Image: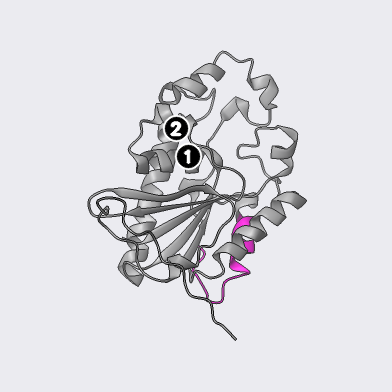
């Protein structure tokens, strides 16, 4: 199968002030967030992407554009509603410090599969729609470009955590064990036998090896030799 690179949007004005933005409009990257997203774009510049799929929210579209600015080719750029932020309902727009006092807060931390946000979405529904969308796009990119295709999905923290939890085979109730920082890069490949997770929550490091060859479908017994970096040209 193709390889998907999951990128969280860079830091926003809401992140910086401790507000749960949710699906609020007008939430943009702050200066640090722009720098974070530009760094993600620089890391991915060596990888010929076939697509950059984005959540419709502005902070993700900004991040996607900063990735596209560093691409030599012309990846397709669909917007995907099913990887948009969780609908936090009445929690949207409130401070995290206030929300920590709500009776639902400890359930979010320990049993998210049981959570439905007041006048909002359940976390189980959030995961189901996001995983289905990622897998659907992955199949489509492989069908068009072959198993060496690499593409990016730009989305949100809880969305990416839920997709990673599914790829790891973890119950949703364990997904708070995963951290996904602003503009971080995580890498998943959906093989014929199972998904494999090749990176989680990285914000530095060379990614040019993704351009060298398709990731192996089978797990190497003993761990294998790892990926091979692309040789740099010498003057």
Distance Cα–Cα, label 2 vs label 1:
6 Å
Where is residue 120 drawn, in percent x and y? 52, 29
> Which quadrant of the figure contains the N terminus?
bottom left
- Is 226 part of what is drawn in magenta? no
Question: Which of disc 1 and disc 2 is earlier in sequence?
Answer: 1
Residue 103, placed above or below residue 195 = above
Whether tag 2 and tag 1 are in contact, CB under 8 A, the answer is yes
Q: Could you say which quadrant of the image residue 136 lies in?
A: bottom left
Which residue is denoted by mark 2 in the rendering?
175
Q: Is residue 124 above or below residue 115?
A: below
Residue at the disc numbered 1 = 161
Query: What residue lies at 55% left-to-right and 64% top-to-bottom?
Result: 44
| Secondary structure of residue under mark 2 | helix
Pointer 2 local density, CA inside 10 Å: few below 14, some 14–19, many at least 20 = many
Report x, y in % for residue 131.
39, 45
Q: What residue is drawn where x is 71% and y is 32%?
A: 18
Q: Is residue 76 magenta?
A: yes
Looking at the picture, tell me which residue is in the foreground, 6 or 83.
6
Q: How is the image coloured?
A: one colour
Magenta-highlighted residues = 61-77
**x 60%, y 52%: residue:** 60
Expressed as whole percent of the image width and height from the top left, the position of residue 123 reads 45, 31
When asked about the image quadrant of residue 224, the answer is: bottom left
């Amino acid at each position: 199968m193709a390889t998907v690179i999951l990128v969280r949007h860079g830091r926003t004005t809401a992140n910086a002030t401790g507000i749960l933005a949710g699906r609020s409009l007008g939430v943009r990257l702050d200066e640090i967030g722009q720098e974070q997203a530009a760094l993600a774009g620089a890391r991915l510049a060596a990888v010929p992407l076939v697509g950059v799929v984005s959540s419709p929210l502005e902070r993700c579209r900004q991040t996607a554009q900063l990735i596209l600015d560093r691409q030599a080719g012309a990846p397709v750029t669909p917007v995907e509603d099913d990887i948009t932020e969780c609908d936090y309902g009445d929690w949207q727009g409130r401070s995290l410090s206030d929300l920590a006092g709500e009776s639902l807060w400890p359930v979010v931390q320990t049993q998210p599969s049981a959570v439905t946000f007041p006048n909002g979405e359940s976390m189980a529904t959030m995961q189901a729609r996001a995983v289905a969308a990622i897998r659907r796009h992955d199949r489509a990119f492989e069908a068009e470009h072959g198993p060496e295709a690499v593409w990016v999905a730009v989305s949100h923290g809880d969305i990416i955590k839920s997709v990673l939890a599914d790829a790891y085979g973890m119950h949703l109730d364990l997904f708070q064990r995963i951290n996904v920082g602003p503009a971080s890069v995580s890498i998943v490949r959906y093989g014929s036998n199972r998904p494999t997770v090749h990176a989680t929550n990285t914000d530095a490091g060379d990614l040019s090896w993704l351009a060298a060859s398709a990731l192996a479908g089978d797990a190497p017994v003993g761990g294998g030799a790892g990926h091979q970096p692309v040789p740099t040209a010498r003057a």
